[in-house]
Amino acid sequence: MPFTLPDRIKALPPYLFVDIDRKKQAAIDAGKDVITFGIGDPDLPTYAFIVDRMQEATRKAEYHRYPHDQGATAFRKAAAGFLERRYGVALDPDREILAVIGSKEGLGHLPLAVLNPGDGALIPSPSYPVYNATTLFVGGVPIPVPLLEVNGWLPDFGAIDSDAVRSAKLLYLNYPNNPTGAVATREFFEEAVAFARSHDLIIASDAAYSEMYYGDYRPPSVLEVAGGKDVAVEFHSLSKTFNMTGWRIGFAAGNADVVGALAKIKSNLDSCQFTAIQDAATVALEGYDRPEIEQQRAVYAERAETLVPGLRELGFQVEMPKATFFVWCGVPDGYTSMDLVAKVLDEAGVVCVPGAGFGPTGEGYVRFALTVSVERTREALERMRKLQW
């Protein structure tokens, strides 16, 4: 009997990075030397102090059994300690902290915990594609909220259609932002909390890049705003800060009822992360202010200081990011984002990501990830200079 895809799968666009990886691999298979600024996957290794702890933890027989559904007590306490030291936010590790298998998994399961079919979710455009996809999975209604350069890539809450807001139960925020690299102020989060309160919304704050900042800037948390944890759940990831993308570990923190609902969903769908990984992640969180973390920020800053001026010379409209390891830039006149991506891949062997893949408002922009050494970044720019624009 032929298999028919369910409607929820038919409604999904192709996952952006899968499509980019397919095109990149085709170029590699054709013998091209490809320099990829595509998916945001750190090229630097996980820190030795974390790997050393992991090696010790894997030998503990008690960790070879099913982990605790909510996450190991020590890991949740370390997460709470990180939030208190970094943001001055005091949370109960038993009720307001939940281990997740990477923030992507936590964000992906959240709509199951808070939305009924037909409920709306306010989703920024452009944004991480997972917000839209997982809303569709549960029969929710994605409601695009345009992010515009003129507004610093922040949502204009006053411009959102009032009928759409009435149907919504969830608001996604992501600052520092993927893909734009934009940052938010504490005043913005105060506005967001007030907006959520007045419309009975839950804020899902994706803080995956909270520790990837440059200079004197320090990203704030929605949880540090008065009333923030009453309306918000914030998702933190160890992937980028500690080069642990493959380890799949993070945590959700905030409103106890929402955290509890997410825990109930997860207890029925997964068995949490391997406890040895949580043990290593505990050491990571306790050492978030170690000097090697600051040294890594300097590496990304140097890469940005190489890439951004080079792109400007080529006709891209681009600002130096204050946070994240992404460079978001307007494409030269005469190109769509897909046209530009295809041109630099086909003619220069350079991979970047089309802004249109992050939502309609991303058209006209492309994203470069700072996951390429300075030397290879210079080589990529030199290749692109030789193109006919």
Image (tube, rainbow, N blue to C red):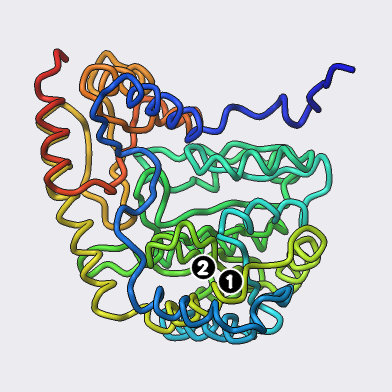
Badge 1 or badge 2: first in the primary sequence: 2
- The label shown at residue 380 is none
Quadrant housing residue 136: top right
Quadrant housing residue 368: top left
Q: Secondary structure at mark 2?
A: helix
Q: Is residue 334 left or right of residue 82?
A: left
Q: Is residue 257 left or right of residue 308?
A: right
Residue at the image point whose x is 40% and y is 73% from the top: 51
Q: Is residue 155 left or right of residue 332?
A: right
- How far apart marks 1 and 2 lie (CA) works out to 6 Å
Q: Position of residue 56 (x, y in %)?
A: 48, 82
Q: Is residue 227 above or below residue 309?
A: below
Q: Position of residue 286 (x, y in %)?
A: 43, 84
- The N terminus appears in which quarter of the rendering? top right
Q: Is residue 338 above or below residue 205?
A: above
Residue 204 versus residue 271: which sits nearer the camera? 271
- The C terminus appears in which quarter of the rendering? top left
Residue at which label 2 appears: 222
- The label shown at residue 228 is 1
Q: Position of residue 137 (x, y in %)?
A: 74, 40
Quadrant housing residue 352: top left
User: Do the residues bearing badges 1 and 2 touch, measured as CB atoms within 8 Å?
Assistant: yes
The residue at the far right in this view is 1
Mark 1 residue crowding within 10 angstroms, few (<14) / some (14–19) / many (20+) = many
Residue at the image point whose x is 81% and y is 39% from the top: 118
Amino acid at dot 2: Val
Residue 300 versus residue 328: which sits nearer the camera? 300
Mark 2 residue crowding within 10 angstroms, few (<14) / some (14–19) / many (20+) = many
